[in-house]
Image (cartoon, helix red, strand yellow):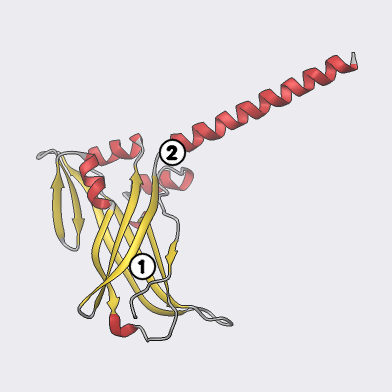
Amino acid sequence: MTAFFMHYCKKIKQLFFGLSLLFFVVLSFASGNSLHIRSANLITYENDVLLNADVEINVSAEMEKAIQKGFTFNFLIEFQLVRPRQYWFNDEVATTVQPVSLSYHALSRQYIVIRNEQQRTYPTLDGAIEDLSIIQDLKVFEKTDMEKGESYQALLLMRLDHKKLPKALQVEGIASNDWKMISQRFEWTPNILK
């Protein structure tokens, strides 16, 4: 009798584990919205230091519907150059924030990406997202801001700007994770001064 009961408990435990694993997998795919920085580097052009990065962006079906209904989504690309300090806070050398927006124009049936007051249009959402996911030649600071012999840390983050979400989505965003898009904090040591 005890062996039967133990076997039964073991089966219930396995079933519970399988169902909870399935639940977490479904939850991770259900949200659908994600930002992930794949790579980033700094290059110099004359005295300017430019940022190039590649971001993987996935939008959920719900966000896609909101874009097609005319909602504009504003993203922020946040770059920071710091000088690490051992016993104190890091010394902030340069900070740059670039806004980028994604919207849909129903009359022309075009998706619009606005970056640096330059507007680009695309016939598909995938094309617009591909443009949004490439950060190219963004001036982040000047070469003279760095000193030879010092070590620096570059930080990059991309996120959906919640303050500029339409009011209807701001209210929904408080209770839902659907509108919380933020990348990981991508860090690297730039090798500009040689």
Q: Is residue 18 above or below residue 191?
A: above
Residue at x-position 78% and y-position 22%: 9
The front one of 164 and 50 is 50
Q: Amino acid at mark 1?
A: Phe
Residue carrying label 2: 31
Residue 69 in view:
no
Secondary structure under tag 1 reads strand
Could you tell me residue 7's position as x and y percent? Answer: 80, 18
Q: Earlier in the sequence, mark 2 or mark 1?
A: 2
Task: Specify the quadrant of the image occupied by residue 65.
Answer: top left
Residue carrying label 1: 79
Could you tell me residue 71's position as x and y percent? Answer: 26, 45
Residue at x-position 23% and y-position 40%: 125
Horizontal arrangement in the rendering, residue 115 relative to residue 189 (left or right): left
The front one of 148 and 27 is 148
Q: Residues within 10 Å of mark 2 (few under 14, many from 20)?
A: some
